[in-house]
Amino acid sequence: MDMENSAGTMTQAASIDETVNEDRRNFVKKLSLTALVVGVGGAVVECGRFLKPNVLYEPSRVFKVGEVNQFPFGSRTVIEGKGVEIVREKDGVYAISLVCTHLGCLLKPVLNDQEIGYSCPCHGSNFSPRGDVLGGPAPRALPWYDVYMDNTGNLVVDASKENQKRTKLVV
Amino acid sequence: MEKAALRKLTSLCVICGVAGIALLGIMEFRDGKREWKHFQIEYKELLLKKISRDRNPAFYERVLGMKPEIKQIVIDDWGAVDRCVSCHLGIDDPLFADTKQPFRTHPRPELLKFHPVEKYGCTICHGGQDLSTTYQGAAHKTIAHWPVPMVEKGLIQSRCGLCHKDFAAIGADKLVKGREIYKEMHCAGCHVINRQGGAVGPELSAFADKDPGAFSYAALEGNHSKQNWVVEHFKNPQKVTSGSPMHLPALNEYQIECLSSYVLSLSQRDFPRQYVPKLRPDFEPPKMDVVVPEAELSNPDDDVK
């Protein structure tokens, strides 16, 4: 009886030992897997960051265009080399892109026509003074860019951000 | 699979995983510790204190949303990518006139008016390593393997002379004086500038464009830069270039500075039209190989400043 009893406890102890071992093994397995996934995954993500450079060798898309009083009311001023026109009206200032949405030619402001504001010399797209397409192959209206005034009183155009609501900057 | 092999594989996985995580941690730590990132965060705080939301809400919001990023001025015309403005953030902002460096406004705002930072960048006048984003790497002081360290204050006029050939018109007193010394000592007896002068010594017409690597710095005291080479050479030509037949009277510090500025301004670089300064209609390039009568030679101690 005693013998049987003791044998019973022994097998019980052994099986507990076995489950503890099994638990440990599972834990270590999970831990190693997690460490591997986090480590390798993180390395892959960080390598992926190289695909998007911090900065490119190109002129900044945010640029000063000059003091506000250089743009009198009712004026439309083409900023040379930037493909942007600054329009100042009674109710505010805005910057409109002069790059045709068709194939990227530089638009020509039309001065002698009430309705047409810009015309493309390449394929003849016409845009209204607000940039909407009036005709020709251009698929989209001209984007307006974000404009703000900095603390020195200079107007700054941020051509990396489109002003989708077409709000004018009140100065 | 065998148990032993499985165990080995598991421990390999653990080691690789932990090593990967450790490397990631080091990378995050080091990437976040870059100088310019700290400066940009500090600049943002300073700027927010100086401007008010009521006066210019759009600008205030923009400043609030500012994140550290590399700022640069790209000038295709001479291939400069000046990242100095990543730290020198208030360089053309009068609000930062008495802030500590690197935020302080340019000490001569009237010069920036004629040479807007966006058009000229920084290194064309100041030298230094344009692409660098650290204090040391930008060559504020001489560094190894970068040929053009930042120009010292005393020689800064030499950079004006790269474009401005009419020294008097821009008030470059050191360049004017340097040219006078050159004439007085009759350097043109041995050296050629713009096809005028003798052929004993090396031609100096494009001295500023000369590769700094072509100079010997072995006997030079102090910084190994072309600027320092010129200064030391005027102090004692034979010491810097052994066996040089060049001889010149003892000059005082100011005269050496003037002469070095002048020589370091001699450039034949072509700048695009929009960067070339206008000349007076009656401007004539000065004749260099004229002999000044000895009686008119000035005493070196006359013009100590």
Image (spheres, coloured by chain):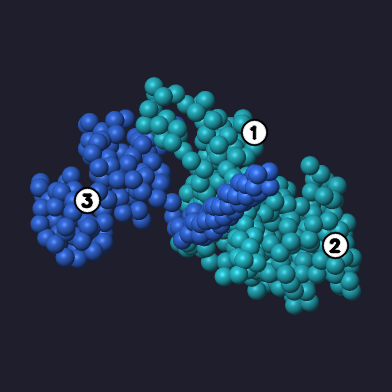
Choose mark 1 or mark 2, whichever is in front. Answer: 1
Q: Are marks 3 and 2 on the same chain?
A: no
Quickly name the residue at label 3: A142
Picture coordinates of residue A146, whole percent (x, y):
32, 41
Categorize mark 3 by other alpha carbons within 10 Å: few (<14), some (14-19), many (20+). Answer: many
Tag 3: amino acid: Leu
Write down the quadrant of residue A145 in the picture.
top left
Quickly name the residue at label 1: B100
In the rendered view, tell whether residue A40 sits above or below residue A4. Answer: below
Q: Secondary structure at mark 2?
A: loop
Quickly name the residue at label 2: B220
CA gap, disc 3 to disc 2? 61 Å
The chain containing the residue under callout 1 comes to B
The chain containing the residue under callout 2 comes to B
Please tell me which of labels 1 and 2 falls first in the chain.
1
Rendered hue of chain A is: blue
The chain containing the residue under callout 3 comes to A
Q: Going 40% across and 50% down the picture, which residue do you hit?
A: A61
Going by the image, does A126 lie left or right of B182? left
Q: Secondary structure at mark 1?
A: loop
